[in-house]
């Protein structure tokens, strides 16, 4: 395990690299028909980071490459979370582990709303620098919070102006496998405490104990570019509570989302020929929840 308690990273190392890799996938999604991510900022981040393998990957037109495979499924995931925020219409949104997510610049948000983006300090610094150089202007209020999600992120969020009295739309996209079980459980306790009635969650769960090896083995690799993050070294699959049940017992109405079906039926992008573990990821690991009481 290459991870340790309190480890940190920049945008080209360890878990930080995964933010850049999904960003590269969103850049490549633009070449697919139909594109789903519509992220005009993604290619600029990859160029600015200067990581040679991903820089080469985003110019690679070989649609059988691992990078293009990632573009297929990451585009679907991006669209799902985009639609979640648009449909939620909440006065505040919190993107936990935002990475290079530019929804605060890409989406149409309700007037007067605020998007809080939480991630590690060096990831946020890089993102800020690139967006500032570009002169990018957010489409809503945006507050970036540099804190580790294994620490007291809720205090940092409150100190940054988050209002627990208002409904919130929370996104946990590509985050939970990077947290040890205890940190994931603590995170949902805090999230629940901070959620007014009418709040929404969209989340992607990590592997159940024992699933990690099969998942890692099923992620394709391309030798000449090696763009795939080493998830076997970066993810945790230690036990944690059943998040969907836990939320269901606390006043949340929880709905599982089959992203393979959604991709084919709603997004015009059938995800055919997925490796079995990957198929399960897309079908069984995503859910939305709304706090009803
Ligand atoms: C796979 S990327 C996903 C980024 C973004 N959600 C997206 O889909 O583009 C994982 C992100 O989780 C962040 N992350 C993971 N563990 C974290 C922690 N303990 N504290 C803060 N950020 C964390 C990383 O810095 C990285 O930006």
Image: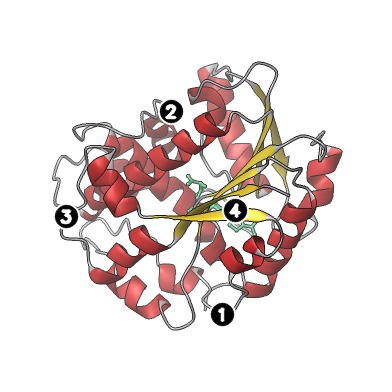
Q: Answer left or right for 234 relative to 275.
A: right
Q: Residues within 10 Å of mark 2 (few under 14, many from 20)?
A: many
Which tag is nearer the camera, tag 1 or tag 2? 1
Percent x, y for residue 185?
A: 68, 68
Report, in whole angstroms, how far the alpha carbon at label 2 lies from the one at label 3: 28 Å
Sequence-earlier tag: 1 or 2: 2
The structure residue drawn at horizontal position 33% and vertical position 42%, both measured from the top left corner, is 75
Above/below status of 267 relative to 133 = below
Q: Which residue is mark 4?
A: 253
Q: Which mark is residue 272?
A: 3
Res. 238 mark: 1
**Tag 3: Cα neighbours inside 10 Å, few (<14), some, or many (≥20)?**
few
Which numbered mark, 1 or 3, is in the foreground of this view? 3
- Judging depth in this view, the residue of 113 and 252 nearest the camera is 252
Reading the chain from its start, which is encountered first: label 2 or label 3?
Answer: 2
Q: Earlier in the sequence, mark 4 or mark 3?
A: 4
Q: Earlier in the sequence, mark 1 or mark 4?
A: 1
In the image: residue 247, left or right of residue 44: right
Contact flag, marks 1 and 2 (Cβ < 8 Å): no
According to the picture, the residue beneath numbered tag 2 turns out to be 41
């Amino acid at each position: 395990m290459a991870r340790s308690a309190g480890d940190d990273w920049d945008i080209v190392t360890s878990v930080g690299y995964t933010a850049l890799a999904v960003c590269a996938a969103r850049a490549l999604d633009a070449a697919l028909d139909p594109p789903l991510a519509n992220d005009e900022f993604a290619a600029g981040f990859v160029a600015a980071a200067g990581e040679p393998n991903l820089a080469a990957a985003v110019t690679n037109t070989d649609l059988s490459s691992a990078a293009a495979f990632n573009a297929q499924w990451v585009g679907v995931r991006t669209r799902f979370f985009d639609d979640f925020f648009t449909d939620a219409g909440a006065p505040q949104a919190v993107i936990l582990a935002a990475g290079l997510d530019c929804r605060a610049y890409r989406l149409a948000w309700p007037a007067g709303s605020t998007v809080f983006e939480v991630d590690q300090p060096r990831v946020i610094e890089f993102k800020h620098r690139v967006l500032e150089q570009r002169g990018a202007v957010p489409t809503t209020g945006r507050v970036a919070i540099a804190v580790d999600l294994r620490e007291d992120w809720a205090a940092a969020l409150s100190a940054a102006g988050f209002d627990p009295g208002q409904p919130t739309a929370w996104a946990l996209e590509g985050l939970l496998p990077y947290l040890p079980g205890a940190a994931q459980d603590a995170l949902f306790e805090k999230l629940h405490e901070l959620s007014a009635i009418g709040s929404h969650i969209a989340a992607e769960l990590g592997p159940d104990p024992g699933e990690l090896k099969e998942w890692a083995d099923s992620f394709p690799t391309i030798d000449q570019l090696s763009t795939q993050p080493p998830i076997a070294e970066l993810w945790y699959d230690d036990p944690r509570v059943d998040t969907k049940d836990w939320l269901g017992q606390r006043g949340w109405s929880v709905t599982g989302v089959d992203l393979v079906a959604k991709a084919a039926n709603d997004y015009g992008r059938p995800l055919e020929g997925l490796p079995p573990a990957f198929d399960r990821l897309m079908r069984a690991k995503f859910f939305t929840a709304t706090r009803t009481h």
